[in-house]
Structure formats: C-alpha cells, structure tokens
Image (cartoon, grey):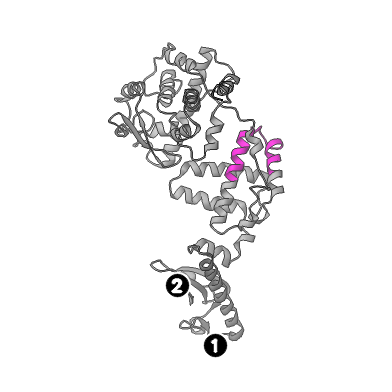
Amino acid sequence: MIRIRLILDKTKQKQHKDKTHPIVLLVCEPNRKPVPFVIQGMSCHANQFDATIGRFTNKYPKYAAYNRILQQQEDKANTIIATFIKKGEGFDIAKFKSAFFDIKSNLTVEEVFDYFIKQMYESEKIGNATVFITCRNRVKAFAPTVKLSQITVQWLIDFEHFLKTKSKETIKDTSISNYLRTFRALLNKAIEKGFMDAEDYPFGKGKFSFNHLNLQTRPRALSKEWIQEIESLELIDDKPITQTRNNLIFARDIFLFSYFSFGMNFSDIAHLKKSDIKLGRTEFIRKKTHTPHSIATHPKAKIILKKYAETSYQDYAFPILNDIIHSSMIQKKNRVKTVLKDVNSSLKQITEKLGIDNLNMSSYVSRHSFANIVRKNGATLEEISELLQHKDINTTRIYLESLTDEQKDKWLDVL
C-alpha cells in the first residue's frame, strides 16, 4: 500500500538562509526508500510544524489557511494514487511526479529526450542512446524549445517538411523515416512514464503516418554469383592481419563471415567470442535486441574464424575489440563504429575492382544478400524474419527484392 506523509525536512543541506526548513511530501512504497517531493513555497521553523499530523502549528502566521493548502496537496496525491489503482496500473514514481506537479504541460521535448538518454546510458544501451541523441539534435534544429504538449499531427508534418527542404544537408527519405520512427518511440516511452496522455498521441490510423517514406526504400543485395566473385577475387594486401584500415582482405573476410553466418550484424561480429563457437554452432546474444541466437557454423565461416584465432585479443573471434584498450561500453561502441567505417570503405574498393555498379556497398549488403538468396531458394518470409532475428516482419519485407515476373507467373502452374 502506498502511503503519503507531510514532514519538515530538517537536514542542514536543505535549510534556507532564514533558518526555515522546506515542507516535503513523502511517498512511501513498501520495501522501498521514501521519495521526497518539496512543496513549493512552503517552509517554516521547527517549532511551527507538528510532525505527528503533518500540519502547521498556531505559531505559524495564518496557519489555518495554509493547513488547508497542505490538505489539498495530500488530497491531490491520494487521488493520483487512487487513479493508478482504479486503472489497474502498477505504481510508478515518475508518473506520480508528472501528475502531481503537472509536468506534462511544461516538459520540453529536449527534456524528455535527455531523461530517456540518461536511462539508456545507465543501462549501457549505448546504441539506443546514440540514435536518440541524433534525433534530439534534429528536433532542436527545427524547434529548440518545443514542449511535449505542443506535438500534434501538424507539427509532425512541418517537422518532416523541414527535414526534407530546410535542413543544412540533404537527408534521404529513409533517414527521415528513421528519425520519425525514433520520435514515435520517444512519445511511446513518454506515455508509459505518464509524461504524455495517450489521447494526445499524434501517430496511428487517421493521424500522422510516414509509411510513404518507405516506398522509396530499395533493397541492397548481391546475387549468389556476385558473392562468389567477391570470394574468388585475388587480393594482394601486405598489411598486418590486425590492421583494419584499408585492409581489403580483412573487409572481405568480415563480409563473407556475415554472409555465411545468416547475415550476422557487424556489431555482433565485433563482439563475438571464441567461446561462442562450440559443437558446430555459433551461439551469441544480439547486441541490438539482446536476444539469444543460435546458428550452425558454416564450413567457410569456420575457415575465416581459424584464420584470426591467433591474432584476436582476449576471447574475441576477430581483432576488432581489445578489453585493455576498449574497457568501457562507450569505447567499445566508438571502436566498432571506426572499424565498420574502415571495412565499408574497403568493401567499396572491392566492388570497384569487380565493376559492380549502382550499389552502395557496405557490410550490411551481406545481410541483405543472405536474405534474398535464401528467399529465392524457397525460404518463407517468416523463416527469413526468424533467421535475421527481426522483431517486426515488415522490416524483413524491406530487405527483400520484389518478385520477378517469372517468379510470380510460376504460381499459375499450381492452379
């Protein structure tokens, strides 16, 4: 049961210059440390407050009138708690604070971003925090002081227009879609925390949608024949095996390992441990989704792993991370980002050597290629989504190329 108490905070740190102390509303949850909320504009000397009933004594000027205000504060707090119980919601101190101080009407979007970014850093979700920071900066460039309560369908339309036409650099539709998706995630989190009312949510059916931005998304995939060309391409590279910059052989190995490992993401490759490979299987936790994944280790993937077994650091499968140098989560994140940039640059050089045109080559092409090749060999959309560990099957659809006329026409034969 949640209890409410009004007390006088007599700690020296909280004492005002006039020697008075602030009155505090204590929210007491079972088995938890009480959380204090200062009642603004309410303070007095120790002999002017009765701690047993939580009220001013007659020694405080106009004590009866101010006691009625204290009663109103208590009633407000108890009403908020009763609302939680009536709705069947678990008590959440952040939601209580938002409702008690009417934070919803005053919170800026930047403050909400910063609140969740801090949480992400504390829980070591560095990648998520980076995505939120980028989106926050886009919003600040458009409307630096916008409040959460001012976010409407029209505001989102104007924000999208700004990103398309008035931003300092050209932003692709896919990137704009990502920013809007991140902003939608922010509002969902804000509703969960009680910073925003669900009825004010501007996304959804009959409201704002950014599905039109995804129509121009083009899959990035190579055919099986091009993969084999990359595999057999003769590359001469005199760089140390541990050097990742401008190392074409290392970049190709990473690309092929991803392809032969069900399109494994680069971050997962970087964090992969030798101890994750056992009994013919590779078992790891995906960095993006924090879900376990178990796949058969392809014979060609085994060859690549063996190549780097003696040159990688600690238990890592590849010479990308070194716990001595990259000890913090942020250092690891920055290192992975740097090496990925090097790998992608080298992969572009490889496609130039092969004369592959109209392809924005990167390590992610191996993931797209894997998805499309297994699809053309009979894998269902659901199976591919599972193999890629996608939470949303619509994400998988974006990966896949449209069926050719020949592929569509063959289904007439079964009628």
Vertical placement of 108 versus 77: above or below? above
Q: Nearer the viewer, residue 196 or 395?
A: 395
Quadrant in which the C terminus is drawn: top right
* Residue span colored magenta: 159-183
Residue 82 picture location, percent across and down:
53, 71
Q: Quadrant of residue 360?
A: top right
Is residue 290 in sight in this rendering? yes
Q: Secondary structure at mark 1?
A: loop
Give the residue type that dot 1 points to: Lys
Q: Is 293 on the left or on the right of 345, as rendered?
A: left
Asked if the stretch drawn in magenta spans residue 191, the answer is no
Residue 386 picture location, percent across and down:
45, 35
Residue at the (43%, 46%) spot, across then down: 124
Q: Secondary structure at mark 2?
A: loop
Q: Residue most toward the left?
A: 279
Vertical placement of 175 versus 109: above or below? above
Q: Nearer the viewer, residue 92 or 209?
A: 209
Q: Which residue is mark 2?
A: 11
Q: Residue most toward the bottom?
A: 58
Residue at the (50%, 32%) spot, across then down: 381
Quadrant in which the N terminus is drawn: bottom left
Q: Nearer the viewer, residue 285 or 224?
A: 224
Q: Give the spatial CA distance, label 2 vs label 1.
A: 21 Å
Residue 39 picture location, percent across and down:
55, 72
Give the residue type that dot 2 points to: Thr
Q: Residues within 10 Å of mark 1 (few under 14, many from 20)?
A: few
Residue 158 picture location, percent across and down:
71, 44
Q: Which residue is mark 1?
A: 59
Asked if the stretch drawn in magenta spans residue 174, the answer is yes
